[in-house]
Image (cartoon, rainbow, N blue to C red):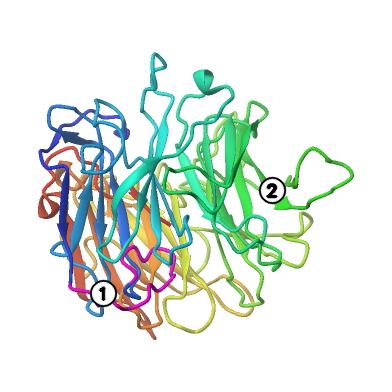
Amino acid sequence: MRKRTLLLAATLTTGLLTVLPATTATAAPSGLSGDFNGDGYRDVAIGASGTTVGTAMNAGAVVVLYGSSSGVSAARRTVITQNSTGVPGTAEEFDSFGGSLAAGDLDGDGYSDLVVGAPGESIGDRDGVGAATIIWGGKSGLSGGATLPAPSGRLAEWGGFSSAMATGDFNGDGKTDLTVTGQTYTGLYRGPFARTGAPLNQTDVYEVGTTYEVFAGDLNGDKRAERVYPYTLESDHGGVIGYLSYDPGNEDHPESDYIETKLPGADGHQGVVGDINGDGYGDLVLGDHEDPRSDKPVGHKGGQISVWYGGPDGPDPEQTPTVIHQDTAGVPGAGEAEDRFGVALATGDINGDGFADVAVGAYGEDNGSARDSGAVTILFGSATGLKTSGAKLYTQNTTGVPGSSENDDAFGASVRLVDINKNGRADLVTGSGYENGSGAVTILRGTSSGLTTTNAVSVMAKDVGLKSGAYLGWEIAQ
């Protein structure tokens, strides 16, 4: 199947396009993470890292769709590149601006900000070391920005800085912090951030293993987010899972306020945190989308996910996790080679019952003769954990879903569950990174009975001014 490094051309000649609904200037900002204009509705930031800006191929862009009582549409959007007014840097070939995204109120003004990774950014004579930019939220939406300070150590050998990012209050001081990760190192930036981009303080990079992923959530109920790093070793291609918890003054590790806990029995390459069983502790959902092979004997044909349930001490390494794949009873479909079930994950309460549900992307799923057209499976949370009864499968052949399944659409390449219209139920946003050669996102609304395809919305790259090769939808900010 084609890889994301295909060099297709998309052209964006304008640096910043903003079309916003009117907002009340005197209203206090909502303080919601992901609400960039503070109007009380969460917004959706989507990466389009393949976008050509001017003549710079694969320079990259970010498309922001603003939430409202009626959901989102292409008419209410901001398109941001490194050529946008107030955004630092210059759009250059292969920067891949928008290759990673993270949202959170970094400066504490009540408006959510957006951190945009450009993993291919060159700095000085160092090619492709990567960079991250903060785009500031405000009552008119996202605008302007600042460059995040680069790590002071090992940058020259650190390809792909900003390949993955996550926000959260990692030390419990009520401020939003940021971690930025790439290749074998990760850095920690403590909030609040100044408008120059400078954090309160910055921890030098430290090694975590070969990883291009990081995610965060409170696994032990202490109101502090743990940072979870799936990484691989030569001896374990199934993925090693470790997470960092705040523990100042730890006698065993006096050099750090954070300690690592490993889950030796866990495997996966991506993940997300959500309270699946409603007990007040975040649960760890891991995706192991790769098929078993000689150097990776673990996993399931077509991919699988596992749930490690949190508790007062975090997930118990001795527990038996819930493992689900497409051959599990109740799950639609069947495990087939290279389905990539679990390659994208999201949690959110779709039906408003108080339990986090899980969206599982499988962009390699074949639908009829349409190879790699993709699918998304919805699994529901309950008091007893993640269940397979009532599971639903969505493709572009599902009645009411816009479009149709075609070769290499990659529907399910990214997923996010977020309440866009403020009805108390999470909506599904999923990307089709290769749709019509340019990418698209599809939005299905959450209801008390689950997702509905009624009033489903599709936003194509062309609808927001992008052309072929934009890769719109490969990344959606969590």
Residue lying furthest right: 251
Q: Is residue 131 visible?
A: yes
Q: Position of residue 362 (x, y in %)?
A: 39, 52
Q: Position of residue 409 (x, y in %)?
A: 23, 47
Amino acid carrying label 2: it is Leu
Q: Nearer the viewer, residue 83 or 399?
A: 83
Where is the C terminus found, in terms of image quarters? bottom left
Magenta-tinted stretch? 22-38
Query: Dot 1: what SS?
Result: loop
Query: Dot 2: what SS?
Result: strand
Where is the N terminus found, in terms of image quarters? top left
| Residue 295 location, quadrant | top right
Contact (CB < 8 A) between labels 1 and 2? Answer: no
Asked if residue 26 is among those painted magenta in the image, a careful observer would answer yes
Amino acid carrying label 1: it is Ala
Q: Which residue was labeled with disc 2? A: 244
Query: Marks 1 and 2, Cα distance to the nearest angstrom?
Result: 40 Å
Asked if residue 54 is among those painted magenta in the image, a careful observer would answer no
Looking at the image, is 315 positioned above or below residue 154?
A: below
Q: Which residue was labeled with disc 1? A: 25
Q: Nearer the viewer, residue 415 or 449?
A: 415
Q: Nearer the viewer, residue 244 or 33?
A: 33
Which is nearer the N-term, disc 1 or disc 2?
A: 1
Is residue 197 found left or right of 49 in the rendered image? right
